[in-house]
Amino acid sequence: MRASRLHSAIGLIYLLCTDRFDSKDLATDRFPEVVVMFDLSHLTESKTWPLILKVKRILDDSGVEAYLVGGWVRDALLGREEEDVDFAVKADGLDVAHQVALAVGGTFVPLDEVNGVGRVVLQDRGTGQLTLDFARFEGTIEADLGRRDFTIDALALDLRAFEDNGQARVLDPFHGIDDLRDKAVRAVSDKAFVADPVRLLRGVRLAATLGFAMEAVTSAMTRRDAGLVSRVAGERVREELLLLLSVAGSGTFVEQLEKLGLLIALFPELGPAKGVIQPKEHYWDVLQHSIKTVSAFDFLVRQGVWEYADEKTLSVVPWSEELEDYFGEAVSHGSTRATMFKLVALLHDVAKPQTRTVEAGGRVRFLGHGQEGAVIAAEVMERLRFSAKETKLVETAVKFHLRPTQMGLPELPTARAIYRYYRDTGEAAVGILFLSLADHLATRGPSLDTSNWTLHNRVVEHILSQREREPSRLVRLIDGYDIMARFGLIPGRKLGEIIEIVREAQASGEVITREDAFDLVRRVLAELSRENENRKP
C-alpha cells in the first residue's frame, strides 16, 4: 500500500489492523482489537501539550483510567492543533474535572451531573480560552467508542501509555485512521443518528471543515434519519449551523443539506419554495435560488467560488480591508456578520410562495415578500435560539433585501435616498448591499449580463462611498433641547419629526451650519402653521 501523506505527517511506527467490525460486535460489546502506535512529537510545541502532560500526571497519581478521545485525537493525527480537549475517564467526570481545575488553576464548570461530565476552562492570552472536558465511561473504552458518532472521532489515546516525548498508543476499533487517510466521514453504527440526531448535522459539518466526503452508506443513513433533526434543541442546531456557515465555500454544503433531506427538516418554512416558478429572468426556482444565493455570497466575500463567474466578474465588486473587517466582526457568541448574512441569503425569499401572484398578462410578482419574510425569519431565529442581536440583524436584512435595487436604477441614488437607506437598515446596511449582489448572481446564474452586473456594482460602490451619510456618523448640529428652547416646542411626535427633517437635510447637503438648521426648523414650523390655518372652517 502506498504510504499516505497522513502517515508520513504523523510518523507512523507500526499498525496492527483486522477486518472492519461486524454489526454483531456492537451488539455484544466485542470489538476487533486495533492498536496503533504513533509519534506525536510534532505537537510538543502546541499550547495544549504541557497541559495534557499535567493532566496525565494528576490522573496517574489518582489511579484513574483515562483516555484522550474525540476531536483532539483526530486533529492530532491530521497534524492539526485542537484547543478543546476531551477526556474519557473511568470515574466521575465531575470529581476529576474539579480536581484538575484546582491543580492547573482553571475554572470548574459542571456540564452534566446525571452522566458525570465536567469542564475545566483556562484563560489563554492568545486564543481567549482552552477547555478540558471530562466524561465518565462505563464498561470498556472500546464499548464507549462504539457509542460515538463517526469512526474518525471513535479514537482513543491511552494516557497510561502516553510518553512525554510524544509516543502514543491509539485505540482504533472502527478503523477511523483508515477513514482519515481516505478522507471519509463514516458513522460508527447504524444507530448513530437515532442515539443523537444532532450528529446528522455534525456529519456534514465535519466533511466541510476537514475537506472530507461523507461515505455512501452514511449518506443513505442520513437521508433515512433526516427527519429526526427536528427533535434537536435549538441551541445545538444553532451551534452546528454557525460552524458549518463559517467554513469557506459553505454554500456547497448547504446544497448537500438539501440533497440529504436535512435542509427542509431544519427549515420547514423553506419547504413550500421547492418548485415555485419565478419570472423569466430567474434561472432557478425559489428554493434553488435561495441555496445558490449562499454560494454567491461566499464568492463575493472571498470565501468561495461561483461556478458561473470568474475573476473578471469579481474584479468589479467593491472590496477593502474595511469590508473584510466588517464581515469578520462578531455579532454574538460564535457568529460573525458573514455567517449571519449567509443565513440571510438562505432565508431572504422565504415568503415568496405565499405572496406569489400572476397578473393578467402572465407577469409573476411577489409583492411584500420582504416584509412578510422578515416576520418568518424572526420566528426561525427565535426557534433556533439565536440572540436578540442576531435575530434583529437577520430580520432587518430580509425585510430590506430589495432596497438597493429600488433606489433609482439605472441612475445613481440621491444623497437623500442614501441617508434613508442607512437610517432604515442600520447595522445591516453594508451586508444588504452584498446580499443584493449575491441575489443578482443567483438570479441570472449562467445567463449573467455583464453590463447590468457592472451597473449594479457601480451603485453599490456609490452607496458605500457615501457612508458619511449614516445617521451615526453625522455631526449633530442641533438637538431637541435646542429646538424647544428657541421655538417653544414641547416633547412629542412633532418634535421628533422636525429633528428627522433636519438630519435628512443635513445628510443631503442642504443644511451645513447650525444656523442653517435653525432656519430650516423655522420654515417647517411656518409651513405647518399655514397648513393648520387652511384646515380651519
Image (cartoon, rainbow, N blue to C red):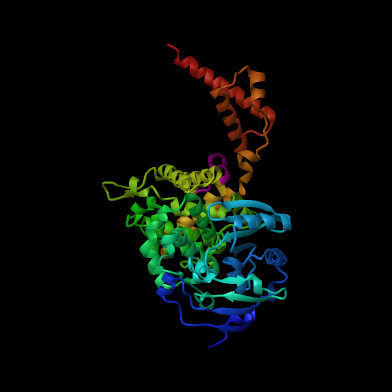
Does the rendering let one see residue 455?
A: no
* Res. 521 image quadrant: top right
Q: Quadrant of the C terminus?
A: top left
Main SS category, magenta section: helix
- In percent of width and height, residue 87 lies at 61, 63
- In percent of width and height, residue 372 lies at 40, 42
Does the rendering let one see residue 99?
A: yes
- In percent of width and height, residue 351 lies at 38, 47
Is residue 275 shown above or below 398? below
Question: Which residue is most to the bottom?
Answer: 1
Q: Residue at x 39, y 60 (%)?
A: 226
Is residue 447 shown above or below 269? below
- In percent of width and height, residue 367 lies at 37, 44
Residue 424: say if magenta: yes
Residue 189: say if magenta: no
Q: Residue at x 66, y 19 (%)?
A: 486
- Front one among 450 and 244: 244
Residue range in magenta is 411-427
Question: Which residue is most to the front?
Answer: 63
